[in-house]
Image (cartoon, rainbow, N blue to C red):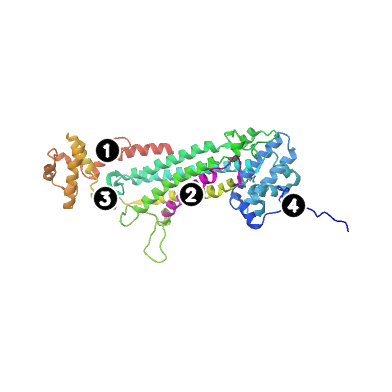
Amino acid sequence: MPVMATKPKVSSKPWQHRLSSDPAPATAALLASLDVDAALYPYDIAGSMAHAKMLRRIGVLKAAELKAILKGLASVGDALAAGKLPLDVSLEDIHMVVESALIARIGQAGRKLHTGRSRNDQVALDLRLWARDQVDQLVKLVRSLQLALVILADKQGRFVMPAYTHLQRAQPIMAGQAVLAYVEMLQRDAERLADCRKRVNLCPLGSGAVAGTSIPLDRRFVARELGFADITRNSIDATSDRDFLTELCFCLATLGGHLSRWAEDWIIYATTEFGFLELDDAFCTSSSMMPQKKNADTLELIRGKSAAAIAALTGMLTLTKGLPLAYNRDLQDDKRFCLPAVAAMRSALTVAAGVVSTARFRPRRIAATLEAGFLDATSLAEYLVSKGVPFRRAHQLVAGLVARAEKQGKSLSQLPLAQLQAAAAQIGPDVAGWLTPANVVKRYQPEGAAGPRQLDQQLKFWRKTLA
Ligand code: ARG
């Protein structure tokens, strides 16, 4: 019997014929990113269309081949949108799913699409297109939340409430100013996202796996097709750079931190103890056991969502540290951090705008306790300064008066003039205009302070800026 050489076993994957086996299921699962990068398909398809048009321009594709590829890619996109394309994990990622579906549809021409391209520059492109889109959507959501806060400050914010430092009563402020403080934070968040976009908006395609290609690709054409401001300069960096994502995560983490501060404030405001704010029922939940409960669960979840963003930032920093040049497969897991973090922040921003636009301040409840906590003590010290008393001495004198008033269960404005004068002879009847929270806010002088004049100025600024 002749000894027949047995046919060597070869990997079934079209891009790894040099391997002799397919991975076992657990290995295939480790290698795959399809569960998360399937969401990138619109960007993958847009990138492939631009690449194909460029291949036609430089003569790699015939007109008929380009036509078939564009039509095929559109149909693959439709199938993915309709959830009608099976996501075969053995294909590892969305790039190979799209390519194999394209080849299944149009045959030979589909096999030319990957000319001069690697999944390394392809995924870098997809991520940049995705990040750019997300930044634009996030900025819009931040703007909507800012607008809701400005409307709240304008419509409901013209009353006096206590400001806190260390969560202890500090000085009286216009309620609108406390609302606008968050508009300021969100403004910086939007600006940071817009700045991050500059480093996102560069086209890496043409970098290949690491070193480029001998095929004379027209990178600038692809960049223009996809609306990029420019192309990346260095193929080695462009295929392994993910700091545009780390930066996006930093923007999200900072934004998440701000949202969590706002949520915490409002959770406190909505308690029975504070009673500063009534949340709309549509944004509250009750209890399966305690029938009376109205919980601010949406605010708690918004506060909690910041964890996803902070985790993504530390995840990206950890994932990328110490990686040798250039692309390493570790990078595939970038999506596992970034995509959920963006989704969390989008959800938080969307619901936050709803919470803000339906909330009701309770100015009468707030006014009822406004005399507590000596909010006018600093003003009284400044009154003494206006009478020539050095501030440090004035501070001391008022501290003594506060201690005395506290023992009597009175506010400073309730102390008889004679008692005030016994502490400081400089005090005259005009002191009344410097006491009580309502008088104090009117006396705030500097630009940016928390008085009614400054509130009007700031509202004017925001209405113009957000228009
Ligand atoms: N799915 C991969 C990623 O997201 C694509 C690049 C894979 N490249 C490679 N040479 N194995 O990073």
Mark 3 to mark 1 CA distance (whole Å): 19 Å
Q: Amino acid at mark 2?
A: Ala
Residue 462: in magenta span: no
Mark 1 Cβ and ligand 1 under 8 Å apart: no
Q: Amino acid at mark 4?
A: Val
Give the mark toward the camera: 4 or 3: 4
Residue 181: percent from left, percent from top: 37, 42
Vertically, is 110 above or below 386?
below
Mark 4 to mark 2 CA distance (whole Å): 41 Å
Q: Which structural element holds mark 2? A: helix
The dot on residue 444 is: 1
Residue at 69%, 33% in the rendered image: 216
Mark 1 to mark 4 CA distance (whole Å): 80 Å
Vertically, is 142 above or below 216?
below
The dot on residue 367 is: 3
Q: Is residue 21 visible?
A: yes
Instruction: Specify few, some or many for label 2: CA neighbours under 10 Å numbering under 14, 14-19, or 20 or more.
Output: some
Residue 371: percent from left, percent from top: 23, 49
Task: Check disc 4 and report the residue beneath it.
Answer: 10
Instruction: Specify few, some or many for label 1: CA neighbours under 10 Å numbering under 14, 14-19, or 20 or more.
Output: some
Find the magenta span and give its range.
300-329
**Residue in the foreground of this view, choosing between 462 and 446:** 446
**Residue in the foreground of this view, choosing between 406 and 101:** 406
Q: Is residue 84 visible?
A: no
Q: Which structural element holds mark 4? A: loop
Of callouts 2 and 1, the N-terminal one: 2
Mark 4 to mark 3 CA distance (whole Å): 79 Å
**Residue in the foreground of this view, choosing between 401 and 289:** 401
Of callouts 1 and 4, the N-terminal one: 4
